[in-house]
Amino acid sequence: MVQALPVRDTITTWVNVCPLAAIAPNTGVCALVAGQQVAVFRVGYGSDLYAISNYDPFSKAFVLSRGIVGDRNGIPKVASPIYKQNFNLLTGQSFDDENVKIPTYQVRVVSDRVQIAIGEVL
Amino acid sequence: MTAKKNLIVIGNGMVGHKFLELAIAKNATQKWNLITFCEEPRVAYDRVNLSGFFSGKTAADLSLVEPGLYQENGIQIHIGDKAVAINRAEKTVTSANGLTVSYDKIVLATGSYPFVPPIKRNDATGTFVYRTIEDLEAMSGYAKNCKVGVVVGGGLLGLEAANAIQNMGLKTHVVEFAPRLMPVQIDEAGGNVLRDKIEELGVSVHINKSTTEIVRENGKVAKMLFADGTELETDMIVFSAGIRPRDELARFSGITVGERGGIIINDNCQTSDPDIYAIGECALYQNRIYGLVAPGYTMAGVVADRIFNNITTSSFTGADMSTKLKLLGVDVASFGDAFATTPGAKEIAITDSVQGIYKKLVLNKDGTLLLGGILIGDASAYGTLLQFVQNNITLPPHPEDLLMPPREGKPAVAAMGVNSLPDTAQICSCNNVSKGDICTAIREKNLTDIGSVKKCTKAGTGCGGCVPLVTDILKSEMKKAGLVVKNHLCEHFPYSRQELYHLLRFHQIKTFDDLIQQHGKGLGCEICKPAVASMLASTWNDHVLAPTHVSLQDTNDYYLANIQRDGTYSVVPRVPGGEITPEKLIVLGEVAQEFGLYTKITGGQRIDLFGARVDQLPLIWKRLVDAGFESGHAYGKALRTVKSCVGSTWCRFGVQDSTSLAIEVELRYRGLRSPHKLKSAVSGCTRECAEAQSKDFGIIATEKGWNLYVCGNGGMKPQHAILLAADIDKETLIKYVDRFLVFYIRTADRLERTATWFNKLEGGIEYLKQVIVEDSLGICAELEAQMEHLVKTYQCEWKVTIEDAEKVQRFRHFVNSDEFDPSLVYVEERGQKRPATEEEKVLIGSAK
């Protein structure tokens, strides 16, 4: 799976979120992980998953999991459902404002369970 | 570091400001202290469009100076302080407020003042001039107590002033000394057409009139007496009889001025004192004052080149006085050698007194080159014709074709040919922007809309006359760059919506995945997915949350409700025709109470329930569906509401039962997905209480049946609907609406309302009538069949969803918790809740 965050000096704890089947292909869900709202997207019909913050800094609402998934020139992205700003699912970078970048999370599938990493700095 | 030199610009009108803009663009502030004196109480404003003041523009709207521009660039501006003396020996300028500043160079941009003819009592109360915002304020204040107004002067500015007076609701007269209107720009035949046209608009024109005296009553203007013994009663008089250069400052400083006024300048725009320049309407070049803004801008450019860049080749050699204006709503243009003064010049002219059009071309001796011309009533060809003149482009074999309006289906000859223009062709004469400048900006900055082109190049920001030409250049450049494909849906589909719709129907494609595999590439995006979802829905009509479609839906369609700013949703049940029983009203109230929803009546005669969380939606729908409600599709690009008045059942004026028809129409087309939302209304009589003429399709009762109007719009850009068919019975009406809606759905662009679609439809309403009423394309049976299928396959999307446990699963905020979104915070206002603002959230202590 894509490793979006540099992992340095951390203990990584993986948290079970939901079965893979709970995320319909090419849609997202929102997971509550250690008090954080994390938007998890399933791109395609397999286990290609991406996780970013659910908070849309443009509308200031927690809604990104409800955006439409797609790509721009092959880069997977999501469009905010409120004002349609686009975010790079690999990096959390906004396509509309270079100064805006939202947190990303590591995500993987282990025996059909979707897991999100919480890193704790040593 | 050498000390900066002082450059003083005297006058902050359009030309003075243009000079400062050029100085900023040339980074002149590094070497020069720029100081400017402005007599008026405000910085430079757009005097060319001054009459906009009467159509609601404010002084701020008219301002040419971006707030902060002078400050940011270190330009010292003295507003409301007039320069009153130049001491050339000491090299200082003194102002009315007593400020003395030394100078190295001066640029005089003092402009002009309106000429008031020497008539007895020309300063009586009730006389005005038309030059500054203050003049206009004084005029409009005084006009409130007037019924009649006279403009003295039938030139360009005079007619502008007449327009202003007429707009203030006064009976308007124009008095002109010459035998025709606009004697400087147009010939006698043109003058006659213009006069007829203006009189048609209710302005009385008096030519060959020399005013001798103004008569006062109670100290105010009451009457004008003319040399021919006639007289005219009036309450106010505006003098607009030409301009005179403001040369007094130069004159008193010993600078040479012309016999009849004007500061004499050479090709360098230098006055008799080489350190002092003069530009704009105060300058006299080869015994001529240029009373237009474009030559003033050219002069400003020459002086800026010379002072800041030392470009000694830059010079002023006279200017083209071509001009295009809209006066009292009438197009008037005059360009090149309009009066055929060139030896051997020939003329071609057409006069259409019926339509009020006069067009004249002046050709060279052998008819191969255009020298000039006059256009009255229709100046659409101005931009192209001017290019023929300025660039010596050889005329087509039948130059008279250039005067003809476009024939059906063919572009006007004069509309062709931006490609034939050389890069050096001057497109915007106000700002001296060439075709090359525009093309370079479009290419290098990847401009794709006219607004950006105007912003980047300044072309079209003066009089605006060249905007159609600039638009053509933009289109042509985009075409060359392969960008005409602008109608491609998005990067994933190289087709327009119309083409994709055809592919989808022709190949019987029923899913997005099949469509993108066969005709597109990539994963799709928020543009193509909802667009394709809409096309699939309006063709096959599967449930929008079917497994193959669910990922295509915008959040509104995904949750079958309207997302609000805080991420909650609003719920609008269908209330067909706006008719609702007390029992159902009570249910709506109970549901709102139970779920804590904010309620508001919509513009479409329905009730909107706001603030529902996703987990509440299925529970709310269950209550509503059980009470006999269904989805109102307020969330979809779909038929919204069919508004109605109460009609003949109750109303004493109604001639038909509009409510029953509205309900029938709404139930027929409910849930219909379309390129954009659809609104309709039915009125029971010609009083039109349901406002049907502002709808995508509107129906108005007549004594004999129904009138069907189409392609109206309220909202952002209001447009009246147009009559498609009159006095038809209900069956015919439904048939036409079926055809109309499917034709629109098949051919419109994504997110294109019917009004916009109609405006782009070649052939307009006549064409639409042929297709819908006369079946000229032979597709009506197919259109009706498609609608029949859609009507038969309708299902309430809420009902289907709550009956499907798997679908209901998705209605929760967290996939792994039953908690609600903790960021939602509300405050109370007028007895209901509303989302807290960010500030309020901080106060409440629950911000993110």
Image (cartoon, coloured by chain):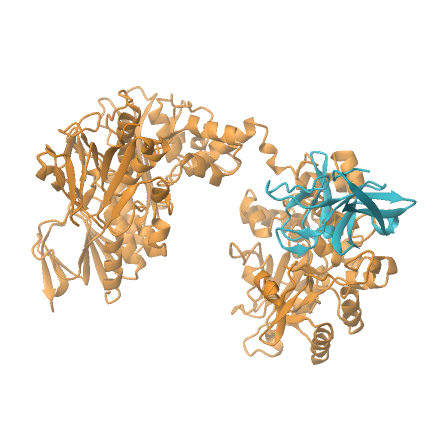
Chain colours: A cyan, B orange
Q: Is residue B430 visible?
A: no
In what quadrant of the picture does the N terminus of chain B appear?
A: top left
Q: Position of residue B495 (x, y in %)?
A: 67, 36
Q: Is residue B456 left or right of residue B566?
A: left
Q: How many marks?
A: 0
Q: Is residue B778 visible?
A: yes
Q: Position of residue B421 (x, y in %)?
A: 42, 24
Observer-nearest residue: B668 or B836? B836
**On screen, residue B679 above or below B283:** below
What residue sits 59% from the left and 71% below the top?
B645
Q: Is residue B243 left or right of residue B451?
A: left
Observer-nearest residue: B523 or B784? B523
Observer-nearest residue: A86 or B415? A86
What residue sits 37% from the left and 42% below the top?
B72
**On screen, residue B729 above or below B27:** below
Farthest residue toward the right? A111
What residue sits 33% from the left and 42% below the top?
B325
Quadrant location of residue B396?
Answer: top left
Quadrant location of residue B181?
Answer: top left
